[in-house]
């Protein structure tokens, strides 16, 4: 691998799961894409935010998606043609010896994580799409399979969304944080992570989780949490109801609303972080931070 990393990092891509267009968007950020074919990808939002970028200037340099596997050959061919991937493979185990790292671009955690096992066993760095797992025990099991610390990189890309962080002026407006109200559309298991990850970044000194209570009604879920330092958190997934992906941060001085509105930038930064982890042999996200995220996901799930 040392010799390869002097050149472009070769990435293998595993996809796709229902409702998740990350194989298209992630590959495009590395490889560029065919505009006409992307209109047919089945995820209308993707060509809309890609067309706002300047290609090839906005691509990530130093890495390329060179191999792809999905559960359907024709789908693999469609993604490959759309995002300039050269090699379609018949078995994800064939990534071993062919690529330097793997992007597991599926978000059906309980199924897709099995696909990570041979990659982990081979010692290959892997970016596992959010959420890493739906239970803390499941996350710990995966983390324990690492051949070295930092082999697994997993997060919601919104962890890196600057719009979901407080500016200096906003920090003054809010003062000491007392509570955060987080809202996102769709279902809890797949989408709560998008607000959990950035909200935990806002309160790094929150202390231990003291108590929690969840409320589930039809397709909507609310989770209330109290931390040791008296910060209260309310996380709500609104199911089929349309709501903004937002964080309302409330403090002793006032409050402010933070909204997500730049998907491409968040994806790009997260993918760049993964590449930096490989090149510099660094742990970019400590395992405990990932476990803290999964803990909240588990607390809000249906039993």
Image: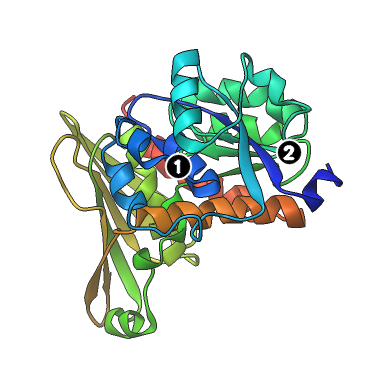
Q: Is residue 184 above or below residue 188?
A: below
Please tell me which residue is depicted at 26% across the width and 38% down the height of the picture.
44
Q: Left or right of 96: which side holds 22?
A: left
The answer, for residue 147, to whether it is visible in the render is yes
Residue 158 place in picture, x, y as percent:
41, 54
Q: Nearer the viewer, residue 18 or 150?
A: 18
Q: Quadrant of residue 1?
A: top right
Residue extending furthest toward the right: 3
Badge 2: residue crowd in 10 Å (few <14, some 14–19, many ≥20): many
Q: How is the image coloured?
A: rainbow
Kindly identify which residue carries mark 2: 100
Disc 2 and disc 1 in contact, CB within 8 angstroms: no
Residue 165 percent across, percent down from the top left:
39, 68
Q: Residue at x 35, y 66 (%)?
A: 163
Q: Quadrant of the C terminus?
A: top left
What's the distance in space between the residues labelled 2 and 1, CA to CA? 22 Å
Q: Where residue 198 appears, x then y in whole percent?
A: 41, 58
When asked about the image quadrant of residue 222, the answer is: top left
| Numbered label attached to residue 221 | none
Is 135 situated left or right of 301 in this image?
Answer: right
Q: Secondary structure at mark 1?
A: loop
Q: Is residue 106 visible?
A: no
Q: Which residue is mark 1?
A: 33
Residue 230 vs 29, above or below: the answer is below
Residue at image location 40% in from the left, 54% down from the top: 264
Sequence order check, earlier mark of 2 and 1: 1
Residue 280 appears left or right of 205: right
Compared across the picture, whether 96 is left or right of 59 comes to right
Near-viewer residue (182 or 244)? 244
Question: Which residue is painted at 28% across and 48% down in the image?
Answer: 48
Q: Residues within 10 Å of mark 1 (few under 14, many from 20)?
A: many
């Amino acid at each position: 691998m040392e010799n390869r990393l002097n050149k472009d990092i070769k990435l293998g891509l595993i996809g796709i799961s229902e409702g998740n267009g990350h194989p298209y968007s992630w590959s495009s950020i590395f490889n560029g894409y065919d505009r006409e074919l992307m209109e047919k990808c089945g995820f209308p939002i993707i060509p809309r935010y890609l067309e706002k970028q300047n290609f090839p200037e906005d691509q990530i340099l130093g890495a390329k998606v060179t191999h792809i596997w999905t559960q359907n050959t024709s789908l693999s061919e469609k993604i490959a043609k759309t995002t300039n991937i050269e090699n379609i493979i018949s078995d994800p185990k064939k990534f071993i010896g062919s690529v330097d790292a793997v992007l597991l671009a599926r978000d059906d955690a309980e199924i897709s994580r099995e696909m990570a096992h041979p990659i982990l066993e081979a010692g290959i760095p892997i970016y596992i799409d959010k959420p890493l797992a739906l239970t803390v025990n499941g996350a710990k099991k995966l983390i324990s399979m690492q051949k070295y610390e930092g082999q697994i990189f997993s997060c919601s890309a919104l962890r890196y969304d600057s719009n979901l962080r407080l500016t200096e002026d906003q920090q003054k407006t809010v003062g000491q944080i007392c509570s955060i109200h987080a809202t996102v559309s769709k279902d809890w298991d797949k989408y709560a992570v998008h607000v959990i990850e950035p909200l935990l970044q806002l309160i790094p000194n929150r202390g231990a989780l003291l108590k929690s209570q969840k409320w589930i009604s039809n397709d909507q879920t609310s989770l209330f949490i109290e931390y040791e330092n008296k910060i209260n958190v309310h996380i709500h997934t609104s199911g089929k109801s349309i709501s903004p992906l937002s964080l309302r941060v409330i403090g002793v001085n006032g409050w402010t609303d933070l909204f997500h509105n730049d998907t491409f930038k968040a994806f790009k930064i997260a993918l760049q972080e993964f590449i930096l982890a490989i090149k510099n042999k660094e742990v970019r996200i400590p395992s405990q931070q990932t476990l803290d995220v999964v803990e909240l996901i588990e607390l809000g799930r249906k039993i």
